[in-house]
Image: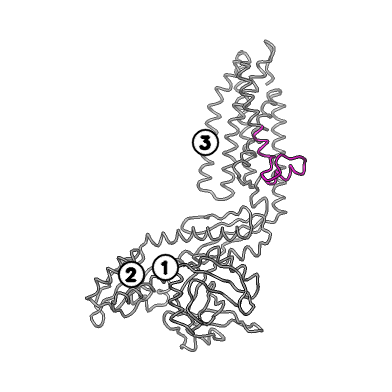
């Protein structure tokens, strides 16, 4: 008996030592604390606090994934035109719409992002068209439209496959998460949270940035889509939007769009406007790198490099349009419209940026990857450090008051056995906090609620055991037999209650987000620790006490 108690006590001491060491040991160069100040620093380093406790920014963003579908459609539109010319298949027109009805209706045309309309295909070469689509555009279904056009030609409608649309949307959301994560990490924000939020069909993200030093700048970096495009300028600049439309009778030419740009005159002034190609020569997705620099005129600039495929396309466009203006478009706004002096290959430069900070931020955006779609901020909350400190203070006070109340009750009601319960309860909290440190979990305000609930569950387990022991003692059993029967009979009930609660916590973790998951994790760890302390540790203490009681002495319970 003595040997079994010693072995179990050694295991308990090892768990206590590992827990204390994990909590107080500094992960950096601090090591074991030598004074109270170093102890506080180690605790601050080891226990990761969530946004609601540390303060910071909480944002819910919606990713407009259909922007990426539209980009895919537009790129395919350009490739199809080139493919038809390469295969020497005559055609009349290639439009981003499903049929003549949607092509003629601007509203329907803008909403239709999954179709391409091809007209004027000779009947004798319809097989060549189908072969080209099957070989080069496997993500598209081709359907011949009914009827024969003028000259005996045929029309076709290409539709992006639904599986491909779903894949593009999901990949866009994943890429947005990765890109935002890179941007935030590049700014030095520690322990950010970027994850999916709400229903999967909403394509929303939650972004939490604890302890943000410059929240304004970080918010601007995150919210900027950095949708970078290079588009040929057809006409402009115009002094106003109305002036640009007036030159075309209020209707823009096909395959063009009207975009605003910054007035770069000495005094600034209102925006100027450009008529540019709707389809970009290259986009930010063709970039491999970007760094801030200084242009030949001394202004801030960004030097960029392109992928092999992007460089080939850019070289072809710039080589065929030397002397024309090329608009550098960021987030549907013309940043500059330099003249193409010569053919451009893998390297280029964005010039005429106003400040060094602007060039640095733009290079960061481009280097970390352009977002594949635009983003809308659905909600934004800023939690100040003082509010987080207030939450910590109230949470700690609630935990201490609850703990002291339970300790007092157990001592008064169960007398000597209450000391047993209080020691097990204290060890339960120690193991719980140590587990948070070892798995690098983040403690949130709901997590503190989970800790308080764990304290209640721990006491509940002790009460079950103690009441069973009392019943056994009333039936005249010896102390050793009563303790053994009490733990054996109560264990089934304790196990049942813990398993059902863990299942509930698992459901919360599976379907919850952020703080709800933190509560579920805290509760689960606390319940596992409680099984160890209320059953194993408490039993060892009872056995040790019972082994030292004089023969015939009563157990203080």
For numbered disc 1, what is the local secondary structure?
Answer: helix
Residue 306: % across, % down: 49, 69
Q: Which residue is mark 3?
A: 500
- Quadrant assignment, res 266: bottom right
For numbered disc 2, what is the local secondary structure?
Answer: strand
Q: Which residue is mark 2?
A: 158
Question: Mark 2 and mark 3 in contact (Cβ < 8 Å)?
Answer: no
Residue 345 appears left or right of 126: right
Q: Which residues are magenta?
A: 17-45
Distance CA(mark 2)–CA(mark 1): 13 Å
- Quadrant assignment, res 15: top right
Residue 398: % across, % down: 70, 42
Would you place residue 536 above or below residue 325 in this image? above
Verify whether residue 36 appears in magenta: yes
Q: Earlier in the sequence, mark 2 or mark 1?
A: 1
Quadrant position of the N terminus in the picture? top right
For numbered disc 3, what is the local secondary structure?
Answer: helix
Identify the mark at residue 530; answer none if there is no mark.
Answer: none
Q: Dot 2: within a 10 Å radius of its alpha carbon, few (fewer than 14), some, or many (20 or more) residues? A: many
Q: Residue at x 57, y 50 (%)?
A: 514
Q: Which residue is mark 1?
A: 72
């Amino acid at each position: 008996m003595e040997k079994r108690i010693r072995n179990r006590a050694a295991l308990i001491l090892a768990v206590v030592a590992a827990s204390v060491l994990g909590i107080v040991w500094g992960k950096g160069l601090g090591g074991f604390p030598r004074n109270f100040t170093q102890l506080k620093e180690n605790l601050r380093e080891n226990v990761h606090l969530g946004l609601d406790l540390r303060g910071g920014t909480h944002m819910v963003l919606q990713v407009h994934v259909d922007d990426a579908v539209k980009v895919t459609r537009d790129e395919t539109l350009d490739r199809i035109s080139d493919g038809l010319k390469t295969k020497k298949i005559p055609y009349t027109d290639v439009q981003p719409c499903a049929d003549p009805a949607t092509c003629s209706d601007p509203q329907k045309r803008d909403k239709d992002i999954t179709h391409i309309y091809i007209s004027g295909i000779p009947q004798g070469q319809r097989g060549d068209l189908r072969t080209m689509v099957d070989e080069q555009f496997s993500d598209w279904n081709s359907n011949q439209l009914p009827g024969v056009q003028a000259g005996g030609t045929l029309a076709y409608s290409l539709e992006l496959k639904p599986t491909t649309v779903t894949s593009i949307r999901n990949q866009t959301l994943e890429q947005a998460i990765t890109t935002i994560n890179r941007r935030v990490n590049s700014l030095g924000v520690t322990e950010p949270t970027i994850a999916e939020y709400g229903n999967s069909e909403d394509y929303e993200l939650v972004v939490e940035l604890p302890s943000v030093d410059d929240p304004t700048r970080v918010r601007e970096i995150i919210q900027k889509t950095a949708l970078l495009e290079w588009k040929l300028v057809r006409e402009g600049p115009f002094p106003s939007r109305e002036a640009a439309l007036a030159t075309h009778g209020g209707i823009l030419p096909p395959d063009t769009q009207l975009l605003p740009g910054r007035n770069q005159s000495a005094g600034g002034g209102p925006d100027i406007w450009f008529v540019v190609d709707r389809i970009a020569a290259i986009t930010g997705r063709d970039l491999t790198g970007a760094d801030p620099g200084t242009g030949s005129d001394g202004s801030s600039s960004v030097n960029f490099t392109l992928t092999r495929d992007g460089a080939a396309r850019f070289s072809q466009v710039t080589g065929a349009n030397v002397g024309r203006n090329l608009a550098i478009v960021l987030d549907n706004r013309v940043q500059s419209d330099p003249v193409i002096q010569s053919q451009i290959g893998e390297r280029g430069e964005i010039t005429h940026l106003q400040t060094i900070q602007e060039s640095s931020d733009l290079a960061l955006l481009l280097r970390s990857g352009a977002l594949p779609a635009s983003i809308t901020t659905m909600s934004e909350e800023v939690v100040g450090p003082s509010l987080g400190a207030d939450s910590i203070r109230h949470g700690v006070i609630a935990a201490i008051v609850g703990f002291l109340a339970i300790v007092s009750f157990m001592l008064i009601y169960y007398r000597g056995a209450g000391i047993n319960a209080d020691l097990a309860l204290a060890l339960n909290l120690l193991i719980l906090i140590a587990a948070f440190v070892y798995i690098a979990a983040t403690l949130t305000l709901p997590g503190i609620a989970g800790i308080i609930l764990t304290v209640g569950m721990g006491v509940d387990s002790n009460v079950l055991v103690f009441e069973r022991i009392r019943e056994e003692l009333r039936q005249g059993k010896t102390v050793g037999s009563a303790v053994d029967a009490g733990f054996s009979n109560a264990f089934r009930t304790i196990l049942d209650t813990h398993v059902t609660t863990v299942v509930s916590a698992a459901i919360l973790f599976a379907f919850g987000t952020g703080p709800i998951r933190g509560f579920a994790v805290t509760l689960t760890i606390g319940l596992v620790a409680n099984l160890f302390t209320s059953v194993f540790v408490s039993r060892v203490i009872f056995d040790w006490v019972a082994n030292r009681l004089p023969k015939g002495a009563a157990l203080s319970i």
